[in-house]
Amino acid sequence: MLLPGSVTGLPALGQLVSARTLSGDELVRIGEIHDVQNHFPEALTYYGQALDSFRARKQRKGEAIVLTKMASISERQGRRREAAVQVHQALTLFSKAPDSPVYADALFLSGRVSSWLGDREGAATLFAQAKERYRRSQNVQALGSVTLQSGLLKISDASSEEGLREIQQVLDDARARRDHEQTVAASMALGDANWLLDRTQVAGTHYEQALMLLEQRPHAAVEAGLRIRLAAVSAATGREERGIESAKRAVTLYQSLRDVSGEAAAWGLLASLHQSLGQLPETEEALRRALSIYRQQAISVHAIRPPIPTAATSPRESR
């Protein structure tokens, strides 16, 4: 990961930067530094300046890359309809500059958003296109990531055996490559798959295995997603006290990540857990926190069809 001091020729992040003095590529690089730290307003500011720069110079590939990055932030913040518009614009531009490796990322992102918005057939097509591009570029990890999402989509569409087989294959391959990050992701996906199949105990086992792997190499965003899943499993199996512990940890992690959508989801789950135990003051406080965040977010109408689980939602919530 690039850190501010390692980016040659770029100003420190605390300094004022004028878009007039930097190229579009340089603005993108500064945006990426903020992006990986979940500093979304700052990242979007620099991405927006880069977008203006690329458009002014008619640099379509650069424009498409920036739109994809902006769409990724929109998706992570739960603004999936906005993400859909941005990534559609990016794909239109990429069709005129198909050599960009980011083209595959845009297809993958568009597939995830399409799935969430209910266009499952379109999502399957986009995942297949992304897979083909990742195969051609020999991007093994990205290919594994899109296969996990494809497998979950198949499971939610009643092709459970094929979906489970795909996810298990990714897990086996990741272990063989000693790819710790993808091993964790595949373990989480197996948990999600079993949750969708109403195998709650099995799902919890896979989530616990993923959490143990994370203890070796901590990752706040991934742990937050696991904690909220484990809280949901605890609620479903009558272990509310344990679920409260997991949900509180998720709240803390999402706050540190400045992920308001994830934090709101964690507060909402925490309220539900307290309510199950008859703890009314705690329930009201958690609901107040969740509602306070939701009121600050743009109102959006979600599709009826369920999304593939994300770090901010438990699999059962997505059904």
Image (tube, grey):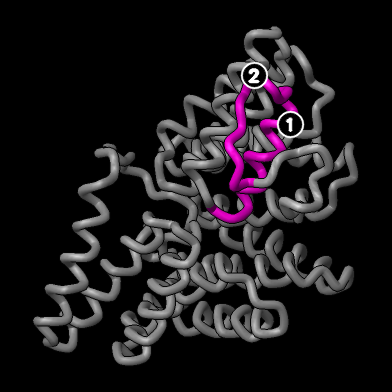
What is the secondary structure assignment of the residue under circle 2? helix
Q: Nearer the viewer, residue 235 or 319?
A: 235
Q: What's drawn in magenta, residue-wise? A: 13-38
Q: In the picture shown, does residue 172 fall above or below 40?
A: below
Residue position marked by numbered label 1 in the rendering: 26
Q: Is residue 121 visible?
A: no
Q: Is residue 288 left or right of residue 198?
A: left
Residue 302: percent from the left, percent from the top? 31, 41
Q: In the picture shown, does residue 14 fall above or below 80?
A: below
Q: Is residue 14 left or right of residue 292?
A: right
Q: Amino acid at mark 2?
A: Arg
What is the secondary structure assignment of the residue under circle 1? helix
Q: In the picture shown, does residue 119 fall above or below 95?
A: below
Q: Magenta stretch containing residue 34, yes or no?
A: yes
Residue position marked by numbered label 2 in the rendering: 20
Q: Magenta stretch containing residue 152, yes or no?
A: no
Q: Nearer the viewer, residue 201 or 98?
A: 98
Q: Residues under labels 2 and 1: Cα distance?
A: 11 Å
Where residue 124 sits, quadrant-wise, is top right
Q: In the picture shown, does residue 14 fall above or below 192?
A: above
